[in-house]
Image (spheres, grey):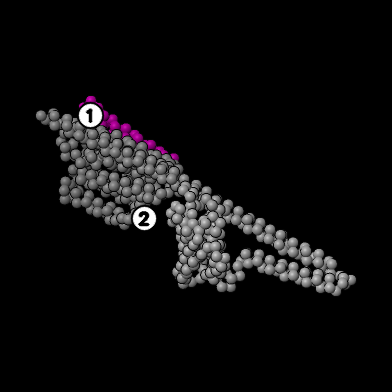
Amino acid sequence: MVEVTSLTNEELLLSAMVGMFLLALGVVFFFLAYQRRIIKQQKEHQAKEAEYQQQLMRANLLSQEKERNRIGKDLHDGVGAMLTTAKLYFRHLDQDVAPEKFTELKEKAFGLLEETMVSVRRVSHDLRPVVLERLGLVEAIANTVDQINQAGEIRIEFRHSEEAEPDKEYQLNWYRIIQELITNTLKHAGATVINIDLTGTADQLQVVYQDDGVGLTRGEEPRNGLGIQNIESRLGLMGGALEFLEKEGSGIYLEMISSLRPEPIRKDESPA
Amino acid sequence: MEEVFNKNTLDFLKNISYLIWLLPLLIAFARRNLLDKSQKKILSIVLVMIANDSLTYVLSIQKIPNLWVYHFYVPLLMILVMRIYTEHLHGVRYERYLKYLAWGFVLCCLIESTVFGGLKSLNSTSIAIASLLYVALSIMFFFHWLSKSENFKIGERPMFWLNMGMLVYYSSTLVLFTFYNRVISDQHLFHLGWTLNAVFYLFLIGSLSVALWLRSQV
């Protein structure tokens, strides 16, 4: 009887000690495997983040290049052509020319110079809208909205309530974002109504943009488009973010948020 | 099982462990100028373990009672281990309680040594509690490392090897001391328990050797 009990105790102690040893080893290997998995996930995440940043940078460069091409084309085809013609008129302005012809050429030359000035103003307005410069973001958006509403193809409702004005650079970014979104809706969405809600607190600006157009088609990744990448890039520069909340086939619904001004660089963060 | 777990095997393993202690000592000596802050603390743990083993061995061969040594060794080791863990568990929720835990344990040891048992018997309760604390600290440490999510291989850090050795050895020690009353009253169980413990002790020495061997990552 004693022998049986002793044997049972031996088996119990042996299995408990070996079992505990194996369990402890198992715990160690579990942590090793788990940590390896975390590192792998971190690396994947970092690679995706780097790829996304590259995409944003590429979109930014493409956008800049596109803008430069457009300005170049405007200057070459518009301003350049008008100045060339004006130069021709001036060449014919001679004291020997009959007074009627002289007056006609002079008028034409002045007319061309006037048109050239308008073109230059338009180009410069495109680069930095005067209304934005003078009256601020809300007025600039309202101005754009009015212009589009007057055309009558689509109705834009713009609501706003803001406590503070964003920084000048941020205003231009937001203005370009709204322009880009409206252009996208006009070009691709076939919408009849656009709603823009701008809400500004003391330190943040939020814009909700929605239309009743076709929205995104099934499987379409909204962030793949150059326009959206531009918007994300601009928001990224303002420390902001955007979120798509659209449903398939029921228009687009976007929420965007950013700070109102760049964070001041603290002394301890400044580069050595 | 008696053919394997007997006095000869136990003595053999004990002798092996005395010899194997030379390994971390030699490594520490060879890398004495290269050891980082953690490794120096690990070395202090190794030195205390060696001192304990040497003293108990010398006393046992001279037929002098040696159990009193453990009454000093167990709390001292706890203080050294806690010193290294409090540094590496910096930022955990219960960080400030670790110090109190260590001193609370020392108080427990003192009570067991003076009130219960006395210096002539083994402080088994203190050893069991210490084992439980070491296992808890090891697991806490692994969780803390995972929560930090830092991008490095933990296998290349000395603290990982200390932690692994402590977890593995003290898990089995905890079991052994849970069965302590049965173990000391049965010769077979005695040899079985202490032989297995000696095997796991070799594992701990190996882990500590690796911890001292690794190149500093800091």
Q: Quadrant of residue B214?
A: top left
Residue at 47%, 58% in the rendered image? A212
User: At numbered mark 2, what does the secondary structure look like: helix, strand or loop?
Assistant: loop
Foreground mark, 1 or 2, reads 2
Residue B164 appears left or right of A39 = left
State the residue lying farthest toward the top: B3
Which residue lies under the disc numbered 1? Answer: B6
Q: Is residue A268 visible to us here?
A: no
Residue at 27%, 53% in the rendered image? B101
Neighbourhood count class around disc 2 (C-alpha, 10 Å): few under 14, some 14–19, many 20 upward: few
**Disc 2: host chain:** B
Q: Position of residue B148 (x, y in %)?
A: 39, 51
Q: Position of residue A115 (x, y in %)?
A: 71, 68
Answer yes or no: are tags 1 and 2 on the same subunit.
yes
Seen from the viewer's position, the closer of residues A147 and B32 is A147
The amino acid marked with disc number 2 is: Gly
Residue A110 appears left or right of B159 = right
Q: Which mark is residue B91?
A: 2
Residue B172 appears left or right of A51 = left
Give the extent of the magenta segment: B1-30
Look at the image and say whether residue B17 sits in the magenta stretch. yes
Say whether disc 1 or disc 2 marks the residue closer to the N-terminus: 1
Q: Position of residue A121 (x, y in %)?
A: 66, 68
Seen from the viewer's position, the closer of residues B49 and B85 is B85
The amino acid marked with disc number 1 is: Asn
Neighbourhood count class around disc 1 (C-alpha, 10 Å): few under 14, some 14–19, many 20 upward: some
Q: CA distance from mark 1 to mark 2?
A: 47 Å
